Amino acid sequence: MPDSQAYLQRIKTLSDRLVALQRPIRILDAIKWPASVQDTFLARDGAALPNIGRDYYEHMPLPFDRHNLSEAFAQLEIDIIRQLGAQDALGNIMRNTAGQYRQVLAMLGCRGSAEFGHYSRLLYGSPSNTIAGDNKTLLELGQDLCQIFSWPAAEHLTPPGGRSYSAEFAVDYLATRMDEYFGANKVRVELSDDIVSDAAAGGDCIKINSRATFTLQDLNVLEVHEGWVHIGTTLNGRAQPWATWLSVGSPRITAIQEGMAVLMETLTFSSFPRRAQKVSDRVVAVDMAESGADFVEVFRYFRDRGDSPQDSYKVTQRVFRGAPVTGGAAFTKDISYVKGFVENVGFIRSAIAAGMPEMIPMLYLGKVTLEDIPVLYEHFCEGHIYGPQHLPPMFKNLNGLYVWFGFSSSIAGLDNVRVRKHFARLLNTPQSLS
């Protein structure tokens, strides 16, 4: 219908503006630390705070005028209301996204100060927040997971030997796997001297830290985490004819993205106890920083627990990016992995219980939140939103996923303490050979 086409064109025009406005904003680039900071810190045995403060960030200017950009986002919000109406559901998603980008710009203007942590909590949340629909805090859940993944059994499951695969090997390996999943030359994998983490995904590219080394398990995690989820949802969003903003995401989509990535690691059996513990450790590290621990204190907590100095530095550095190294504030993004995992599992279980499994693939439409999915599904049914082109196999055929979550939901209702005690007695009792 003409009216429908006119509406969709307005959606596309406003959506394209949103995509263009957010393009220069790269949060992690704006708060990254050079690799030399790690070298200096570890050379001093972690005895002195890194020399990162307000001065450091002031000498690393943002590649845009944040005040002008914030005004442009505010004008976009006004135009969305004028052109779509205050009650339009797709318009509200775009307005929420634009509003979050204004908060991001405010946060980046406070790099190195405690105010940075205030905006980070608004955008990503805090370990003191509770899980959706439950009274348990993210910190309590993170502590429980840290304990589970440090049980003695984890040591038996860790393969012997260190990281023996080079960054160059990782590039070749992952490039082959990306071609197999997405099709030839759809995704680039390249070396980078400009990232602190071992790997990072952006757009249609996976960057591999040229200084990093890997195990084969690490590379399998990167394949599904960075490739299937982060790049897959980006490409699905780019394929949208009108809702083009689904190819990009403000912090509101971080939990579902990181949570889906961790869930995919789990469903493909790519993850391993040490990897899962690292994800859980991040919640603890954020809480320590927010509670006043400085960089050295958080680093020593993990090192004294038995982690390597390099791993202890990495988890600590992640939560102090942008925040004062003296403590009292944190970059809280790293709570998203645990938060998103739990809430995504809850959503999938609920969709199955409600008899609406067709909602589950909507997780892969693009950069979405769980709250967006009912609206997007309605517009999908109307032909305004295209279904995801790139879907992991277990989301293409939901039979196995349905059974997996069905059994896990049933088991979750058991008295796990009594069950463990029963089998503990069995395992501790020598069995007769006769």
Image (cartoon, rainbow, N blue to C red):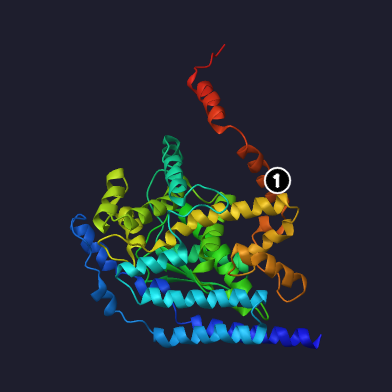
Residue 296: image location, x then y, percent: 24, 55
Q: Residue furthest right?
A: 1
Residue 394: image location, x then y, percent: 67, 55
Q: Quadrant of residue 1?
A: bottom right
- Determine the secondary structure under disc 1: helix
Front-lying residue, 405 or 118: 118
What's the residue type where badge 1 is placed? Val
Q: Residue furthest front?
A: 86
Front-lying residue, 64 or 266: 64
Q: Quadrant of residue 80?
A: bottom right
- Tell whether 387 sits left or right of 432: right
Front-lying residue, 83 or 341: 83
Crowding near the residue tagged with mark 1, few <14, some 14–19, many ≥20 C-alpha atoms within 10 Å: few
Disc 1 designates what residue?
Answer: 403
Quadrant in which the C terminus appears: top right
- Tell whether 333 sits left or right of 253: left
Q: Is residue 216 above or below residue 150?
A: below
Q: Is residue 80 above or below residue 312?
A: below
Instruction: Give the residue at x 61% y 51%.
Output: 346
